[in-house]
Image (cartoon, helix red, strand yellow):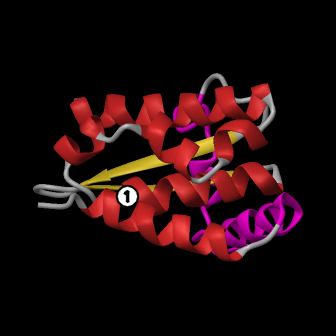
């Protein structure tokens, strides 16, 4: 059975493939970030801040009986788009699906691995680690 994360990854990969060069892909990433639900100023606090990101990144985890929902934001346009991609893949998922998802392979499939600066790659890894930690808790 295919995991919902893999299905969403297929959709994202198709979107990225339709775009030409990385300039177009970066614009798409920024557009994805514009679609994030707004966070309140109160939620942009130290407790929700993701450590290890050069930009400011905040993640809020909401638990239901069998799923985790994440909301996030960043003060940087491209990073906000990366948050949107992570949330599109991992929000509203079962904790077991989140912890078993191979994020490195998934982002490589999107071509992000070679297109991001070291700082952004490290920040992306920090976001994933935080989400995995919340899913394992």
Residue positioned 45% across, 31% down in the render:
130
Q: Please determine whether, in this image, residue 45 is positioned above or below residue 15.
A: above
Q: Please determine whether, in this image, residue 43 is positioned above or below residue 133.
A: below
Number of numbered labels in the structure image: 1
Task: Give the percent coordinates (x, y) of residue 104.
Answer: 49, 34
Q: Splitting the image into 4 quarters, where does residue 46 fall?
A: top right
Where the C terminus falls, by quadrant?
Answer: top left
Task: Give the percent coordinates (x, y) of residue 57.
Answer: 66, 41
Residue positioned 82% across, 50% down in the render:
76
Left-right relation of 108 to 61: right
Left-right relation of 101 to 81: left
Outermost residue toward the right? 23
Q: Is residue 12 visible?
A: yes
How many residues crowd around disc 1 within 10 Å: few (fewer than 14), some, or many (20 or more)? Answer: many
Residue positioned 56% across, 58% down in the render:
85
Residues 92 and 122: in front is 122
Q: Splitting the image into 4 quarters, where does residue 135 fall?
A: top left
The residues colored magenta run 21-50
Residue 111 magenta:
no
Q: Is residue 92 visible?
A: no
Residues 109 and 63: in front is 109
The residue labelled by disc 1 is 91
Q: Please determine whether, in this image, residue 32 is positioned above or below residue 67.
A: below
Residues 63 and 26: in front is 26
Residues 70 and 129: in front is 129
Q: Please determine whether, in this image, residue 16 is positioned above or below residue 104.
A: below
């Amino acid at each position: 059975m295919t995991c919902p994360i893999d299905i969403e990854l297929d959709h994202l990969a198709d979107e990225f493939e339709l775009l030409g060069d990385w300039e177009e892909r970066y614009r798409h990433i920024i557009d994805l970030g514009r679609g994030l639900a707004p966070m309140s100023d109160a939620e942009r606090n130290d407790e929700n801040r993701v450590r290890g990101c050069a930009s400011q990144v905040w993640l809020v985890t909401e638990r239901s009986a069998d799923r985790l929902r994440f909301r996030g934001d960043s003060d940087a346009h491209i990073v906000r788009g990366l948050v949107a991609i992570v949330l599109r893949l991992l929000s509203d998922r079962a904790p077991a699906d989140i912890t078993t998802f191979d994020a490195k392979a998934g982002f490589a499939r999107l071509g992000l691995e070679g297109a991001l600066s070291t700082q952004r790659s490290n920040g992306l890894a920090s976001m994933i680690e935080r989400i995995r930690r919340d899913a394992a808790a």
